[in-house]
């Protein structure tokens, strides 16, 4: 019964956008699916940890400054997601007609699916937990991982250059 809801084929509950990340892996092997998400969470946590450590090489005075960028990224992506999702809901709700019969409700569900198919979940933490949102794109998570990795490498080079200049006098 749960698979039917995930695939959007349930007649009692209409799934608006049933394209979850790695849904085919989940349907074949839920254990492998969970291991895949453990791997994704572990790699992204490692990147965030390296990012915080790189910040500590540059700003070593206050501990709050170390975690502030990660906190701002999490809260900022959550606010962006709620802003864009509210905008999409207003657009969708304005275009839905009353449901007087079954064919009208099916047409409304198809219209909602068409209008929300382009929606991208911007909240970064939704990508680190399985089955939280059906509008996730792995490219979005990879872009954030790449941005954090590049900033981490740049901060490491800056800190090592600064340390080398301090040792040379």
Image: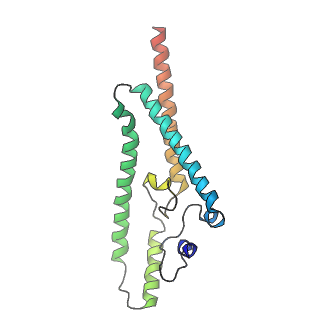
Nearer to the camera, 160 or 132: 132
Count every numbered label the image shows and give the total: 0
Residue most extreme to the top: 169
Image x and y of residue 127, in percent: 49, 54
Q: Residue at x 48, y 40 (%)?
A: 48
Query: Compared to 67, does 131 lie above or below?
Result: below
The residue closer to the viewer here, 90 or 7, is: 7
Residue 122 higher or lower than 10, as above or below:
above
Where in the figure is residue 82, as x and y percent of width and height?
Answer: 35, 59
Residue shown at 38% from the left, 27% from the top: 59
Against 5, residue 132 (above or below) is above
24 relative position to 113: left or right: right
Q: Residue furthest front?
A: 31
Quadrant in which the N terminus appears: bottom right
Q: Position of residue 154 (x, y in %)?
A: 49, 30
Q: Residue at x 42, y 54 (%)?
A: 123
x and y, in percent, of residue 166 in the image: 45, 13
Placement of 12 over or under 33, stated as above or below: below
Q: Residue furthest bottom?
A: 101
Residue at the spot 61% in from the left edge and 62% down from the top edge:
30
Coloring scheme used: rainbow
The quarter in which the C terminus is drawn is top left
């Amino acid at each position: 019964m749960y698979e039917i809801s995930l695939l959007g084929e349930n007649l009692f509950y209409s799934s608006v956008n049933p394209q979850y990340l790695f849904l085919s892996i989940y349907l074949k092997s839920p254990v492998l699916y969970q291991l895949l998400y453990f791997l994704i969470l572990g790699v992204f946590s490692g990147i965030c940890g390296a990012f915080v450590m790189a910040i500590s090489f540059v700003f070593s005075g206050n501990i709050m400054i170390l975690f502030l960028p990660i906190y701002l990224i999490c809260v900022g992506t959550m606010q962006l997601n709620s802003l864009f999702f509210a905008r999409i809901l207003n657009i969708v709700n304005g275009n839905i007609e009353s449901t007087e019969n079954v064919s009208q409700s099916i047409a409304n569900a198809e219209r909602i699916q068409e209008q929300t198919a382009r929606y991208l979940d911007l909240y970064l933490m939704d990508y680190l937990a399985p089955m939280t949102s059906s509008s996730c794109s792995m490219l979005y998570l990879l872009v954030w991982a790449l941005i954090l990795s590049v900033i981490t490498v740049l901060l490491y080079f800056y800190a090592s250059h600064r340390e080398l200049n301090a040792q040379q006098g």
